Amino acid sequence: MPYVEERLKRGIYKGIGEFHPSAAPAGDPVVKAFVALAARQGLFRHAHTEAAEIEKLVCRYPTVRWLWAHAGLGEPFEAVARVMARNPVLVAELSLKSEVSTGRTIDPRWRDILQQRDPGKTPEDVRGGLIRYRGVR
Ligand SMILES: [Zn+2]
């Protein structure tokens, strides 16, 4: 904890993580301390976990901004879509989530969910973001 607090003084970080909830239960004092730190500083708490666990974390700690690592990685699209729909404050990142695009084409289901999460974005905006992020066309 002191190491992370010292690093955060640099003011360049947007979140704390990844952490793997499987390593410690959600109520563990260390988990609570890092969640509280993230909430106090308005940082994301980056969690690498499956759908059921991220929902538990969002529910248990609603004052922190959760960033779901790899959108659950091995979780199928339907599970991710369901979790994202039920938790509008949850943010997911798509690193290592290879199913989002095949070659240079965005899977239309993922394009749709990305647009639903940010209705202000046009299909071109979504495509542009993925091009920058993943090289998708
Ligand atoms: Zn990870």
Image (cartoon, grey):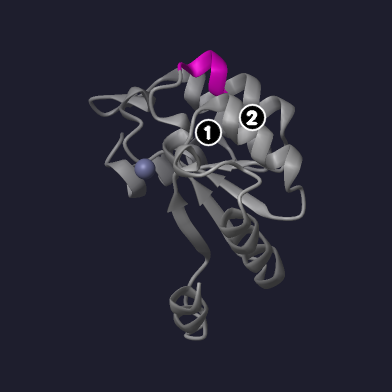
Task: Compare residues 4 and 102 and report the one nearer the observer.
Answer: 4
Q: Nearer the viewer, residue 48 or 12?
A: 48
Instruction: Please tell me which residue is depicted at 65% across the width and 56% down the height of the picture.
Output: 32
Query: Quadrant of the rendered structure where residue 90 is?
Result: top right
Pointer 2 local density, CA inside 10 Å: few below 14, some 14–19, many at least 20: many
In the rendered image, residue 130, in percent from the top left (x then y), is placed at 39, 41
Q: Residue at x 31, y 28 (%)?
A: 98
Based on the picture, tell me whether residue 37 belongs to the magenta stretch.
no
Residue 121 x %, y %: 61, 42
Q: Which residue is mark 1?
A: 123
Q: Is residue 52 left or right of residue 99?
A: right
Prevailing secondary structure of the magenta residues: helix
Q: Give the answer, above or below, for where 118 lies relative to 81.
A: below
State whether label 1 is within 8 Å of ligand 1.
no
Q: Quadrant of residue 116?
A: top right
Kind of element beneath mark 1 = helix
Mark 2 residue's CB less than 8 Å from ligand 1: no
Q: Are marks 1 and 2 in contact (CB under 8 Å)?
A: no
Q: In the image, is residue 79 part of the stretch drawn in magenta?
A: yes
Q: Which mark is residue 104?
A: none
Q: Height in image: 1 above or below 82?
A: below
The residue segment tinted magenta is 76-80
Compare marks 1 and 2 and give the one earlier in the sequence: 2
Where residue 87 appears, as percent x and y from the top left, is 71, 33
Please, what secondary structure does the residue beneath circle 2 have?
Answer: helix
User: What residue is pinned by disc 2?
Assistant: 84
Residue 93 seen by the camera: no
Give the quadrant of residue 51: top right
Instruction: Specify the amino acid type for callout 1.
Output: Pro
